[in-house]
Image (cartoon, rainbow, N blue to C red):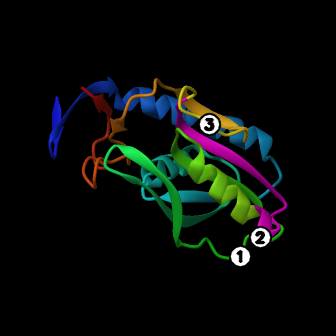
Amino acid sequence: MVKLHDLEFEPYLSHNEIQQAVKNLAQKIDEDYKGKTPIFLGILNGAFMFLSDLMKYYEGDCEVSFTKLASYEGTSSTGDVRTLLGAGNLKNRDVIVVEDIVDTGNTLEHIVAQLKTEAVASYKIASLFYKPEAYKKSLPIDYVGLEIPNKFIVGYGLDYDGLGRNISEIYQLK
């Protein structure tokens, strides 16, 4: 059990289960991008741990960049996505958007709109966690580590009001 602020969370996924999912994703992406040099675009703050581990398992040439967006307050999405930090020049690049978790899809819709204005050569979306029950958009999620129920989770980069990102396992709201 973990207590963050006023809420209690119980164990959900072990560090080893997470690492196996990350390794599997890296292998799939590596197969799809043989001979190319994609740029992995991590969505801060949540995806930093996932992207770091993904890079350890990815064997091909690649580059890494980040963008920072905000859409959450407490345990729920505000529905309003704001860009806090841009990714730089992505024109004519093969971009792999790296998300920690996809639930409503609001953040992804915002990112894809930005990528289209940047005139990227291609883009794919990789998410460690995916909540199919919560997903409201039609964008394909090309690489999914684990499908999970529509419960609030913390750990491995995901937080509750700033706390819990440093936990190496995943905990779900009790």
State the CA–CA distance, disc 1 to disc 2: 7 Å
Q: Disc 1 designates what residue? A: 89
* The one of 49 and 165 positioned closer to us in this rendering: 165
Q: Residue at x 70, y 41 (%)?
A: 29
Judge left or right: residue 3 versus residue 16.
left
Q: Considering the numbered disc 3 on the image, is that residue within a helix, a strand or a loop?
A: loop
Q: Are marks 1 and 2 in contact (CB under 8 Å)?
A: yes
Circle 3 residue: 136
Q: Nearer the viewer, residue 18 or 130?
A: 130
Q: Residue shown at 50%/62% (left/top)?
A: 69
Magenta span has 51? Answer: no
Three-letter amino acid code at disc 1? Asn
Is the C-beta separation of discs 1 and 3 under 8 Å? no
Residue under the point 52% across and 65% down: 82
- Secondary structure under the numbered disc 1 in the rendered image: loop
Give the residue drawn at x 48%, y 46%.
50
Indicate which label's residue lies in the foreground, 1 or 3: 3
Q: Which mark is residue 157?
A: none
State which region is magenta: 116-131
Q: Mark 1 or mark 3: which comes first in sequence?
A: 1
Check disc 2: other Cα within 10 Å, few if <14, some if 14-19, many if 20+: some
Labels 1, 2: front one = 2
Q: Is residue 137 left or right of residue 67?
A: right
Q: Is residue 157 left or right of residue 29?
A: left
In the picture, residue 174 is in which quadrant? Answer: top left
Judging by the rendered image, the residue that carries numbered circle 2 is 118
